[in-house]
Image (tube, grey):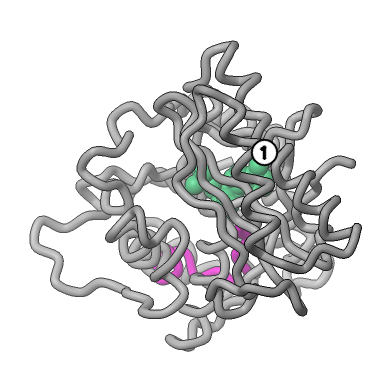
Amino acid sequence: MNIVTSPEQMQATALALRRAGQPIGLVPTMGFLHAGHLSLVKLARQAVPPSASPTGKSTVVLSIFVNPIQFGPNEDFNQYPRNFDRDCRLCEQEGVDIIFHPSVESMCLQDPAVFVEETALSKGLCGCLRPGHFRGVLTVVAKFFNLIQPQVAVFGEKDAQQVRLIQQMVRDLNFPIRIIFGPIVREPDGLAMSSRNTYLSTAERRDALCLVQSLQLARSLYRQGERDAGKIISAMTQKIRDIPSAAIDYIEVVDDATLQPVQTLNGAVLIALAVRIGKTRLIDNLMLPDDHLCQIPD
Ligand code: AMP
């Protein structure tokens, strides 16, 4: 496994691999890896199988970069958990070929003037409460696409709005890259894995289950025939209000393609929520009717 820190070296390596006919799969992360990230590595390898390459080899790149431009001024950029040595061991075990771990200075110019901004899907949900967040995400992901030259990039459904925005960017800006959605990997009790779960105290860790439990409730109401988004949101809100440490940022039922709120659950919808447990902001979601990517336990 190679560790590359220089963007120039990453791009030179990627271009040489591409010239040699070797496909590249990319998994972008902010590090502090868990089983959710590692599941995306497996999907990346499956998507660029060595056997299908003319050289009999493929390359999986995992990037680790806590991207300052996607954090707001009062968010947790400085506290965000980091453990590069542990991440390296996990990547080695998982068969990652290259870790791309650039410095903030090498990725973020002093005087940037060009950004990638999506103007539709990014307006609601997390985009509303985190102004500039998705502009920061898309700008850095576009830079990674140019530096790493992947044919395939894998993103988790955990960040449902993010993966849809990236798909939109790839479509609108003609990146020759296939985007794969990875299912949400959960702890045995159903909590969606997240690097931020490490912020939770023992009591908060228990309280954090209210996110998945509210989605379980939404799914059971849906299965009983409820199609009124307002009623589903009220039931979820009530469930979360029962937990004193929980504060709701949003609970929304949106059209899966446009991310616009719907009143009636017809066709493919996404139920997405962001809840603060103490100081920790957590997100989770459920797609309906096809919920296989969300892996909500029964
Ligand atoms: P992060 O390091 O949190 O920025 O996440 C990097 C990638 O891993 C993103 O595409 C996330 O959607 C994905 N990811 C994070 N948590 C999970 C999870 N529990 N299951 C699957 N993918 C995840």
Helix, strand or loop at label 1? It is loop
Taking the image as drawn, is residue 37 in sight?
A: no
Residue 270 in picture, x, y percent from top left? 66, 64
- Image point (20%, 43%), residue name: 73
- Image point (49%, 71%), residue name: 165
The quarter of the displayed image where residue 95 is located: top right
Q: Is residue 244 magenta?
A: no
Q: Nearer the viewer, residue 155 or 273?
A: 273
Residue labelled 1 has its Cβ within 8 Å of some atom of ligand 1: yes
Q: Nearer the viewer, residue 256 or 188?
A: 256
Residue 273 in picture, x, y percent from top left? 56, 50
- Image point (52%, 23%), residue name: 244
Residue 228 in picture, x, y percent from top left? 71, 67
Asked if residue 99 lies left or right of residue 74, the reply is: right
Total residue callouts: 1
Residue 16 in picture, x, y percent from top left? 49, 69
Residue lying farthest to the top in this orientation: 202
Residue with the mark numbered 1: 192
Task: Please state, as top left, top right, bottom left or bottom right, where the N terminus lies in the image.
Answer: top right
In the image, residue 276 sits, relative to residue 113, either above or below, namely: above
- Image point (32%, 65%), residue name: 135
Asked if residue 108 lies left or right of residue 271, the reply is: left
In the image, residue 17 sits, relative to residue 213, either above or below, namely: below
Q: Nearer the viewer, residue 167 or 124?
A: 124
Sort mark 1 into few (<14), some (14-19) or many (20+) by Cα contacts within 10 Å: many
Q: Is residue 152 magenta?
A: yes
In the image, residue 249 sits, relative to residue 167, either above or below, namely: above
Asked if residue 256 lies left or right of residue 9, the reply is: right
Which residues lie in the magenta part? 144-155
Residue lying farthest to the left in this orientation: 111
Q: Nearer the viewer, residue 100 or 111?
A: 111
> Which amino acid lies under the numbered mark 1 shown in the image of this protein?
Ala
